Image: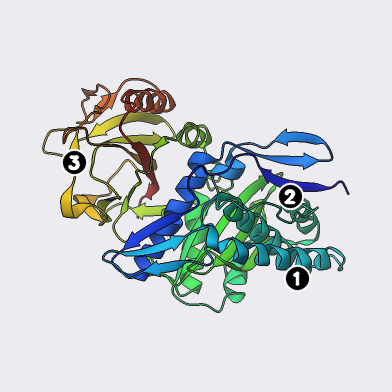
């Protein structure tokens, strides 16, 4: 087997300390998790596979779609708001974890290729890679490497796992391996933020067999799942995580095509997802988060017609901002501006509203047509108390949307260009994605 290791080619510049804030430790920790993920996405351009002396770039989604990174060595500052701080002081803890994981991986590689051994091996490889990303982000060097990949283990698992022909039976098998309560479930295709019909149905079955919570800020544990589409089957991976994103358990299934017959299982928005990631704007120390109230972790949100949500924004500095929405239904895709100040598209967050979850739009009811949608916030610090940025032009259509002309991915590029025109102000962006379904 050729030696293979992961090298991160760029390091977070001047960002060896990452801070989350909140009204309590739980909220501050959740905010820290988000800040860590945002910093990784914005500052790491790529990471490479090193095979001998040949460097090969991997698709950016391999790093940019990584979220739920493990948090170790965090310290709290009991100010108001409370701060959760992750700094280079934690590097020692990550190094120790990497050494321990490498030892476990080297041991498991020599064991028989049973389901139990391979799933443990896959869990340890995922944990190793995630811990290494955070360690490098904090400025660590001379870290251990491993000479086996996640894909190699997945191929071995695909060879020995029996194909399951019923989605209900598959859900029961997953649930039988989990003894935790108060779990938030997310499940989506590998490399995509879209919740397909298949993913939503599987999640519904799982929810009936597990003790779950619909809103992530109430959860004690997180069941994160993704699936890869193979020939005549689907390969499913679930990772059970704690609040600090440590992987507790990995569960693997292979589904026969009979299990998802007549279901929509192929994502259709991967190109948009990559456009949302490539060119991510983060200039300076400005940090902004957008989400739905009650969903402090964005992954895999699916809503039913009739559900109501509040949009909340959190910023660490006074800002002005505007919102761009994206309708990404299979046969209908467009971008539009959302009024945030009466009929105006620009608004500010200042004063005591900084570092709080500020509700900017209340009681939005999910209504047809159903499908994938994304909401993106573009923000800037103020210039002499005034807003230096402006949104793209739009025209109202027959449905009442103020539509921005052009393909959705081109709208992202154009809007980022407008944001970056004013070079002196700090700027950033954030987004939330969800999929709606009929009841």
Please state if 134 lies on the left or on the right of 409 as rendered: right
What residue is at 41 percent from the left and 53 percent from the top?
Answer: 298
Front one among 27 and 62: 27
Q: Which residue occupies 41% across, 34% down?
A: 281
- Asked whether residue 428 is in view, the answer is yes
Q: Which mark is residue 348?
A: 3
The percent coordinates of residue 321 (x first, y second) are 25, 37
Callout count: 3
Q: Position of residue 68 (x, y in %)?
A: 51, 57
Q: CA distance from mark 2 to mark 1?
A: 17 Å
289 and 384: which one is in front?
Answer: 384
Q: Seen in the image, is 378 located left or right of residue 276?
A: left
- Residue 10 found in image quarter: top right
Comparing marks 3 and 2, which lies closer to the viewer? 3
Q: Nearer the viewer, residue 325 or 287?
A: 287
Which quarter of the figure is the C terminus placed in? bottom left
Secondary structure at numbered mark 3: strand
Label ID, residue 116: 1
Mark 3: few, some, or many residues within 10 Å (few <14, many ≥20)?
many
- The spot of residue 407 in percent (x, y) is 40, 23
In front of the other: 238 or 174: 238
C-beta proximity under 8 Å, tags 2 and 1: no
The residue that disc 2 covers is 151
- Residue 214 spot, x, y in % from top left: 38, 65
* Residue 299 appears anywhere in the view: no
Circle 1 SS class = helix
Q: CA distance from mark 3 to mark 2?
A: 46 Å
């Amino acid at each position: 087997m050729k030696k293979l290791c992961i090298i991160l080619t760029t390091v977070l510049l001047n960002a060896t300390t990452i801070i989350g804030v909140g009204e309590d430790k739980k909220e501050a920790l959740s905010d820290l998790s988000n800040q860590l993920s945002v910093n990784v996405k914005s500052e790491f351009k790529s990471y490479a596979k090193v095979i001998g002396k040949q460097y090969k770039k991997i698709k950016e989604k391999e790093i940019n779609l990584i979220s739920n990174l493990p948090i170790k060595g965090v310290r709290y500052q009991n100010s108001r708001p409370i701060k959760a701080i992750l700094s280079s002081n934690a590097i020692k803890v990550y190094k120790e974890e990497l050494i321990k994981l490498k030892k476990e991986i080297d041991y498991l590689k020599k064991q028989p290729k049973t389901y139990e051994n391979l799933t443990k091996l896959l869990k340890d490889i995922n944990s190793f890679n995630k811990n290494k990303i955070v360690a490098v982000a904090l400025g660590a060097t001379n870290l251990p490497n491993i000479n086996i990949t996640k894909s190699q283990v997945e191929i071995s698992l695909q060879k020995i796992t029996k194909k399951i022909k019923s989605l209900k039976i598959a859900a029961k098998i997953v649930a039988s391996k989990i003894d935790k309560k108060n779990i938030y479930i997310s499940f989506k295709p590998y490399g995509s933020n879209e919740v397909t019909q298949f993913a939503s149905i599987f999640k519904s079955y799982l929810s009936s067999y597990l003790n779950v919570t619909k809103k992530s800020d109430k959860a004690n544990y997180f069941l994160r799942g993704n699936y890869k589409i193979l020939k005549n089957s689907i390969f499913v991976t679930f990772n059970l995580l704690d609040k600090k994103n440590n992987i507790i358990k990995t569960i693997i299934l292979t589904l026969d095509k009979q299990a998802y017959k007549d279901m929509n299982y192929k994502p259709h928005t991967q190109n948009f997802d990559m456009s949302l990631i490539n060119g991510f704007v983060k200039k300076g120390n400005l940090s902004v988060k957008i989400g739905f109230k009650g969903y402090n972790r964005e992954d895999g949100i699916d809503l039913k017609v009739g559900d109501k949500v509040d949009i909340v924004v959190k910023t660490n500095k006074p800002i002005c901002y505007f919102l761009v929405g994206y309708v990404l239904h299979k046969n209908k895709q467009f971008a539009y501006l959302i009024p945030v100040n009466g009929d105006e598209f620009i608004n500010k967050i200042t004063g005591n509203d900084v570092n709080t979850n500020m509700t900017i739009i209340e009681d939005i009811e999910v209504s047809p047509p159903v499908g994938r949608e994304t909401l993106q916030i573009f923000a800037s610090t103020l210039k002499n108390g005034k807003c230096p940025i402006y949104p793209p032009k739009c025209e109202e259509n027959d449905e009442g949307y103020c539509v921005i002309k052009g393909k959705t991915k081109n709208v992202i590029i154009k809007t980022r260009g407008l944001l970056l025109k004013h070079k002196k102000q700090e700027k950033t962006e954030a987004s939330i994605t969800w999929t709606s379904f009929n009841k």
